[in-house]
Image (cartoon, rainbow, N blue to C red):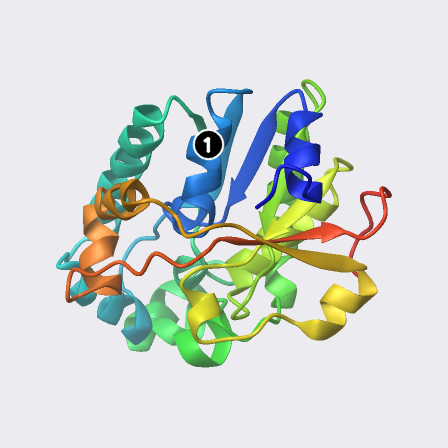
Amino acid sequence: MTAASPLADAIRDSAQLLVLSPHLDDAVLSCGALIADAAPRLPVTVVTLFTEAGPPPYTLSARRYLRQAGASDAQALYRERRDEDQAALESLGVGWAHAGLTEAQHRRRKMADGQGIWRAALLPELVHTYPVYRLHVTSGRLAPDDAGTLRAAIAFVRWLAGRRPALVLAPLAVGGHVDHVLARLAAQRSGKPLIYYSDFPYNQRHVPDAAFIRRHRLCEVRGPRPPQAKADLIRSYRTQASAMFPDGHVPLVPEVFYCRRTEEHGDGDH
């Protein structure tokens, strides 16, 4: 991106940068080069919302994910993921915060006492908010049972952002993962100046929501090709990198951001 881009101007004029990450790798995947570039010039904190797994029994989608990661216990895997995230961000001199919310494919519906136990034993999908990955997790549609998760995400982001003036970077939710949609909504409700980042690697298979971009009067800002250091940073998330890039090659594509066309900030979804 050029020195005169809206993104560069917004970062230059900010007291701190909060990068909202749905999961324990999304911020580095989508804007790791920008984070590394900004860190020497202002305080940067990566705020990750969905940092916890749930207990077994797991859905078929969750079991497939565990196999891809070479793990059998989701909670042990997520402890390792949190450690990876902390080490990667601290290597950049970047702050981090983990909200402790449960990831989408592990969230469970609220049920009357006792019902959840036998239903989960019969078929785990019966008790999960988003039982099937391709049908529900990446549908772009929030389940009614997820209202409490949204409230918790909004409260956490507001708490962090409220300490001093901040610019918030949030996912555009390319690909429709519900956790990315929740993170985007939490950022919009924070009341802080907001810039969106295009979600990598989802943006290699999906296009952004053109209606959302028009409605929020967004313009695209495309960065230069990231340095090799970004690929090395992504590989430091060992539990994820091998599943996402099985041949070991991490494509270094330009990072893409979406800024408001005017100086007006904020605005929620309609």
Residue 90: percent from left, percent from top: 33, 24
In the image: residue 195, left or right of residue 104: right
In the image: residue 219, left or right of residue 83: right
Q: Quadrant of the C terminus?
A: bottom right
Is 142 or 129 nearer to us in this picture?
Answer: 142
Residue 124 drawn above or below residue 29: below
Q: Give the farthest residue toward the bottom.
A: 135
Residue 19 drawn above or below residue 115: above
Helix, strand or loop status at disc 1: helix
Residue 217: percent from left, percent from top: 81, 59
Is 67 or 259 nearer to us in this picture?
Answer: 259
Identify the residue at horizontal 65%, vertical 66% (top origin). 144
Q: Amino acid at mark 1?
A: Asp
Please name the residue that numbered disc 1 is placed on: 37
Regarding residue 102, the answer to whether it shows in the image is yes
Q: Tell me if mark 1 has few (under 14), some (14-19) or many (20+) residues whose alpha carbon lies within 10 angstroms of its own.
A: few
Is 47 or 202 nearer to us in this picture?
Answer: 202
Is 26 or 107 nearer to us in this picture?
Answer: 26
Q: Quadrant of residue 194?
A: top right
Regarding residue 111, the answer to whether it shows in the image is no
Q: Quadrant of residue 119?
A: bottom left
Identify the residue at horizontal 22%, vertical 47% (top origin). 235
In the image: residue 99, left or right of residue 270: left
Residue 99: percent from left, percent from top: 49, 36
Q: How many numbered tags mark residues here?
A: 1
Residue 202: percent from left, percent from top: 44, 67
